[in-house]
Image: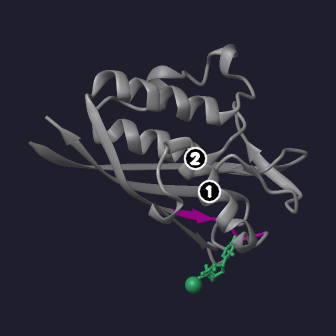
């Protein structure tokens, strides 16, 4: 029998000078600021990892990657997403990802030119077709000019 599951995750970080901005595993070379975080601060990958875990009530990334642990300092978040994906494959028999819908909120710089690259990277990390990965960019209309935020929903199914 096939059961549908929904996953949802969010993440936000403050922006600071002298940091690389990484979104969905893609470095935004035209940004003078990056996320201030313990890891590389990739809000899109963190929200995606939490969305995957939430779909199966498996806690959140802090459960597996405590922010206090020195092991995870400046960690490449693609490793976090890969580890979460492997954990889910190990715990849940047959998982199929149908589509991912994400919103990244950032006032500047504009990200539209990176939409395809970000969607392609996320699709590759999750082994899903790029056409099933929708990325929306929004500004906060000046309400949060020093922050970046991501929200991710996932539709999955499990064969039981
Ligand atoms: O937030 P707002 O509705 O004003 O954003 C207008 C458009 O600007 C978005 O629909 C998106 O295409 C683009 N945008 C972007 N990069 C951002 C924020 C918004 O490309 N960082
Ligand atoms: Mg608007």
Give, as a single range, the part of the protein colored magenta: 103-108
Residue 108, picture quadrant: bottom right
Establish if 139 lies above or below 60.
below
Which residue is labeled 1 in the image? 120
**106 within the magenta span:** yes
Which residue is labeled 2 in the image? 124
**Neighbour tally class for label 1: few under 14, some 14-19, many 20 plus, Cα within 10 Å:** many
Number of disc labels: 2
> At 60% across and 65% down in the image, what residue appears?
105
Comparing 120 with 149, the one in front is 120
Comparing 120 with 5, the one in front is 120
Q: Which quadrant would the N terminus be assigned to in this image?
A: top left
> At 45% across and 55% down in the image, what residue appears?
152
Q: Residue 87: give its label.
A: none
- Spatial CA span between label 2 and label 1: 6 Å
Residue 35's spot in the image, x, y percent? 74, 47
Q: Which quadrant would the C terminus be assigned to in this image?
A: top left
Whether residues under marks 2 and 1 lie with C-beta atoms below 8 angstroms apart, the answer is yes
Residue 116's spot in the image, x, y percent? 66, 66
Ligand 2 located in image quadrant: bottom right
Establish if 148 lies above or below 91.
below
Q: Of helix, strand and loop, which one carries label 2?
A: helix
**Neighbour tally class for label 2: few under 14, some 14-19, many 20 plus, Cα within 10 Å:** few
> At 35% across and 30% down in the image, what residue appears?
59
> At 72% across and 69% down in the image, what residue appears?
111
Answer left or right for 97 relative to 141.
left
Q: Of helix, strand and loop, which one carries label 1?
A: helix
């Amino acid at each position: 029998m096939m059961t549908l599951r929904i996953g949802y995750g969010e993440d936000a970080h403050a922006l600071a000078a002298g940091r690389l901005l990484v979104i969905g595993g893609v470095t935004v070379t035209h940004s003078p600021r990056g996320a201030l975080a313990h890891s590389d601060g990739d809000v899109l990958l963190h929200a995606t990892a939490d969305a995957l875990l939430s779909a199966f009530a498996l806690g959140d990334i802090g459960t597996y990657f405590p922010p206090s642990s020195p092991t995870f300092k400046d960690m490449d978040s693609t490793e976090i997403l890969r580890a979460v994906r492997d954990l889910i494959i190990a715990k849940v028999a047959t998982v199929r990802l149908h589509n991912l819908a994400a919103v990244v909120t950032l006032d500047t710089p504009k990200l539209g030119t990176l939409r395809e690259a970000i969607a392609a990277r996320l699709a590759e990390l999750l082994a899903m077709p790029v056409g099933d990965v929708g990325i929306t960019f929004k500004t906060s209309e000046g309400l949060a000019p020093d922050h970046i935020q991501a929200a991710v929903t996932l539709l999955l199914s499990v064969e039981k």
